[in-house]
Amino acid sequence: MLNNLTKYLVIVLILSLGFGQLLRFDWFGLPIYLHDALVLLVLLLLFLQGQALQVRKFDLRGLALLGAGLSLGYLRALTLYSLSDLLVPSLYTLRLLGYIALYLLLKNSKLLVSNIYFLISGNIAILIGLGQYFLLPDMRVFQYLGWDDHLSRLTLPHFDPTFTAVMIGLALLSTAKAFPKFWLLTSIFYSAGILLSYSRSVWLSLVLTGLLFIKNKKIVLVSSVLLLLSIFALPQKFGEGTNLLRTFSIESRFNNDLSIIRDQSWNLITGIGMHKGPNNSYLYLLATTGVLGLIGWGTFMFSLYTKSAHKPMLTFFFLASLFNNVMFYPFALLWVLLIESKAPSAT
């Protein structure tokens, strides 16, 4: 019974990712996400089934280094910030540890969940996104809730064009092998959604991923021509967001990351705990967990990659993390860990 309930909750968890930030609720000023509540429930059920006592002898050296980096970072942070300032960052860290624990326990379990649920989750996201683009293109009405003022871009369900495009890209690349015939149809809508996000970093990450994995030169040539034609055909509407030559977002991200590099409150050895917010995921790791954390997380990700059946998806994930903090965006990280765990079966 517990096993069936766990499987049901994992399925709901996968599907919930398709709704993105729409399933976020505020509780005393803190954002609460449905998927995080589901992660806690699944962890509890797995513990009750004794999975924690049966975990195989994983190579945990990378995670041990990450743990050391996090610990040193928070020791350093305690000398710089008050305990109240570290409350929210500590919750982010607990969430990260929860995701890792979920991956390890699912990897060890005999739970099998069909890849069809990842495809459905991706379809939910693209349907919401396209619906928003055509029915509610002006997202500036949500500024009062703290979201950015996006106009004439596919923004939902994550209230951010880039992260929405990232999630659609992950769905696009992680379901190709399981459903090749149906994927050809859905990929048209996925590609349209990614293009309408006007997120150039996601476009570049996908192009580089394609160049690395598509060996047929004719397919590369045809795809390149179609991509260029599609980009030139994109509607250029009022607003800076649809201006493909815009430089403000690039400059602001660069200046933000540069200011963090110049900040003297952290160093390469310790970092300062998960407190700062660089756009580049690797700089984020270095600034928050130091060299130990960067090496540890890199080792863990490399172990995922070497055994993965979804190498293009992971490559896209790594490349997109160069431009935005994709690697630690909860929805993206959880998607990757779920599909890389033993949760999804081959069908």
Image: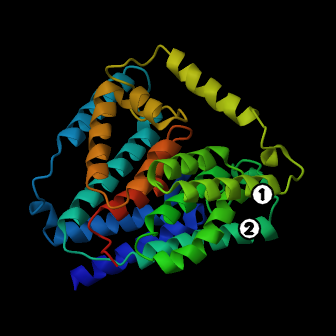
Give the residue pinned by disc 1.
139
Instruction: Report the side of 85 relative to 10 (left or right).
Output: right
Q: Quadrant of residue 36?
A: bottom left
Give the residue pinned by disc 2.
132
The residue that appears at 77% across and 49% down in the rendered structure is 149
Query: Where's the C terminus, which quadrant?
Result: bottom left
Task: Say which amino acid is labelled 2.
Answer: Gln
Task: Quote the CA–CA distance across marks 1 and 2.
Answer: 9 Å
The residue that appears at 51% across and 37% down in the rendered structure is 322
In the rendered view, tell whether residue 293 sits above or below residue 96.
Answer: above
Q: Earlier in the sequence, mark 1 or mark 2?
A: 2
In the rendered view, tell whether residue 4 sits above or below residue 134.
Answer: below
Q: Position of residue 174 (x, y in %)?
A: 44, 64
In the rendered view, tell whether residue 345 sits above or below residue 213.
Answer: below
Q: Position of residue 201 (x, y in %)?
A: 62, 44
Task: Say which amino acid is labelled 1.
Answer: Met
